[in-house]
Amino acid sequence: MFARQLLSVNQGKMTVLRSNLGDTPQLAKFIAVLELGQWMRLGKGEDSSGGRSKPSLLSNVFEAIVGAYYLDSGIEAVRDLVEPFFEEIVNDLPTTEDSIPKIKNDVKGWLQQVFLSPEFPGNPNRQPPDYKTIRSGSTDNDPEFTSVVCVAGGEYGRGRGRNKKDAEKRAAEDALRKLNLL
């Protein structure tokens, strides 16, 4: 049932839905429902400062559990684990333009929506953006990555960061700035 619901959602709405479904507070709620915060191993300082209820830590725990479960049991087992969570909340999550302020915090998702929009002339085949990221320097202890975001063969932005995710985010921000959207 859940998979059929998702098949009826267009790509732009799917981007917003995926962004809202996989955001830190939402993933943290899943861990709270499973009551797994109590099993996290934390240092004394983190524990005393409320680490067991921090959305960023809880979100990371959920992602780690899903990843470990996938490696141990495969994709079907993971689907069986997470689908009930997603089914319960997917209808309550925004999937329309009124959720754009939230997706603006996810610049890669926002940029993808721009590129996939029929109003965007530089992408006639409606291809999602492609990020090319390389390690561009520094040491093993202090790496630096450079990312370029392209669509339909054209380069739209460049960014640097201490990891691939940050470099891609900076490239998306650069592209949005060049498009006068940021």
Image (tube, rainbow, N blue to C red):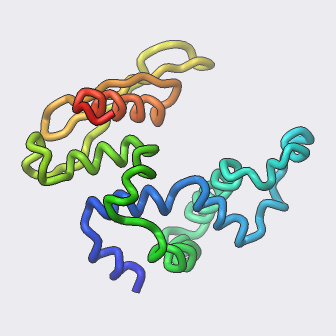
Question: If the image is split into quadrants, where does the N terminus sit?
Answer: bottom left
Figure quadrant of residue 134: top left
Instruction: Give me the residue at 42% from left, 22% from top.
Output: 160
Instruction: Give me the residue at 61% from left, 56% from top.
Output: 25
Which x, y percent locates residue 2? 42, 81
Residue extending farthest bottom: 1
Which residue is at the front of the view, 92 or 123? 92
- Image: 173 above or below 67: above
- Image: 171 above or below 20: above
- Image: 48 above or below 160: below
Instruction: Give me the residue at 7% from left, 48% from top.
Output: 124
Task: State left or right for residue 114 relative to residue 138.
Answer: left
Question: If the image is split into quadrants, where does the C terminus sit?
Answer: top left
Exactly how many numbered labels are in the figure? 0
Figure quadrant of residue 111: top left
Which x, y percent locates residue 176? 29, 34
Task: State left or right for residue 47 relative to residue 17.
Answer: right
Task: State left or right for residue 177 relative to residue 116.
Answer: right
Task: State left or right for residue 89 relative to residue 151.
Answer: right
Which x, y percent locates residue 6? 34, 74
Which x, y percent locates residue 101? 41, 50
Instruction: Give me the residue at 47% from left, 59% from top.
Output: 20
